[in-house]
Image (spheres, helix red, strand yellow):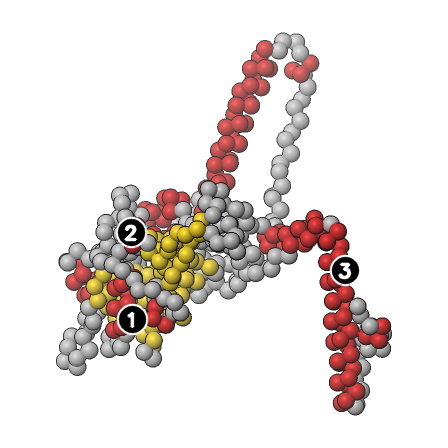
Amino acid sequence: MASKKLHLSPKASLPFKTANKHKRQDLHVKQKKARDSLKRDERFRRKREEDRNPELRDDRVKKNIPLTLDRKRVWDETDRDTGDGLGVSVDVERLKRQKLDEEATREQLEVGDSDEEEDRDSMIDSASDVEEEQPVQPRGKPRARTATERATSPTQSTMSTNLDLTPEALAARFPSLFSMESPPTPKILITTSINSNLHNEARLLTTLFPHSVYIPRSAHRYGHKFSIREISSFATNRNYTAVIVLKEDQKRPTGIDFVHLPHGPMFHFSISNWVEGKRLPGHGNPTNHSPELILNNFRTPLGLLTAHLFRTMFPPQPELQGRQVVTLHNQRDYIFLRRHRYIFREKRATEKNVVGPDGKEVKGVEGIRAGLQELGPRFTMKLRRIDKGIQRSSGQEWEWQGGMEKQRTKFQL
């Protein structure tokens, strides 16, 4: 219980400053103790009330959700016809759902109008023939949700990406990435920037991307410095499907470029937080099996384009006996890459059941848990630019370029 001597006095709350340093320190300590005591009493009082009525605790926990930038995310106001949508931040799944709802509503209205016409024809000398129909009041624009309402809604950051929701204009603009046929088995050429020292990191990428080979670029003073366009032409003639260029600064990976062969596009990513597998505590050793691929939270047209790029980097049929999975999780336009090995085991007595994104327990997997062991490497990517075709280092023509959005609550992927 709080002491009577520690309550905040009206004099202590006045905005005054005494010239005595020790008195100011004592006043500050007394104010802090009084505030802490009041907070503690309030916390104990709330605990006693929640013990008597558990519903109060459930309501408080339900509303006590932090208001993060993900919860504050805003979208561009646009209709269904967004074109390719590379520069527009729209939720493709939400637009698809709105289109289906409008079609269902239109069908119901057509059925209702046909029924009304039949009833009107069947009624003769009825009073309803002379009554004027009331004009339909136009519906107002739906009210935008506040930040608090968005914060209390279930998050979708853990939802997997639905690649079937690609806009038609986007698929027509990049036909090589959005082919109706199943993607071929990838064959990737990995190289580095000129005079690079990232030979070990490039060899690690060969273990991450199946069917890839590392060819170092010549650093000899009399050797020819091949450009990316020449390397891409060399790789296309030898049936490669993609070229990966690892960039460095001060002997650290700072960027990675993906070139989709034979004619592009070319994706430029920045890299941060590179950690090798051997530096991870409790890491495992990867095998040569083709991993499974998980793409999370790519929701905009630009996000779907990026997700299709990563899909072409891995074989369409994973080797399940290897029990390896590569996860690309998008959050606030940062793409986190992780590689794990999983194993299914029985649930321990101290563990809880598997919970879905909605917070409810998943049925059918009670008593089963999945153990994970990270294999590495791990790093974080951010999309900076998409070049039209295979450009030179200056990148004269580009499809999309980042850094143009200044609003912190609007994301592009």
Residue 35 in the image: state x and y as whole percent: 76, 72
Under mark 3, the amino acid is Arg
Alpha-carbon span between mark 2 and mark 1: 26 Å
Mark nearer the viewer, 2 or 1: 2
Tag 2 residue:
321
Q: Earlier in the sequence, mark 1 or mark 3?
A: 3
Tag 3: Cα neighbours inside 10 Å, few (<14), some, or many (≥20)?
few
| The one of 34 and 78 positioned closer to us in this rendering | 34
Task: Name above or below for residue 251 compared with residue 409.
Answer: below
| The one of 390 and 187 positioned closer to us in this rendering | 187
Task: Name above or below for residue 352 compared with residue 407.
Answer: above
Q: Earlier in the sequence, mark 2 or mark 1?
A: 1
Tag 1 residue:
201
Tag 3 residue:
45
State the residue at coordinates (51%, 53%). Answer: 349
Q: Which mark is residue 237?
A: none
Under mark 1, the amino acid is Glu
Look at the numbered discs 2 and 1 and tell me whether their residues touch, using CB distance below 8 Å: no
SS state under label 3:
helix
State the residue at coordinates (82%, 77%). Answer: 12
Q: Earlier in the sequence, mark 3 or mark 2?
A: 3
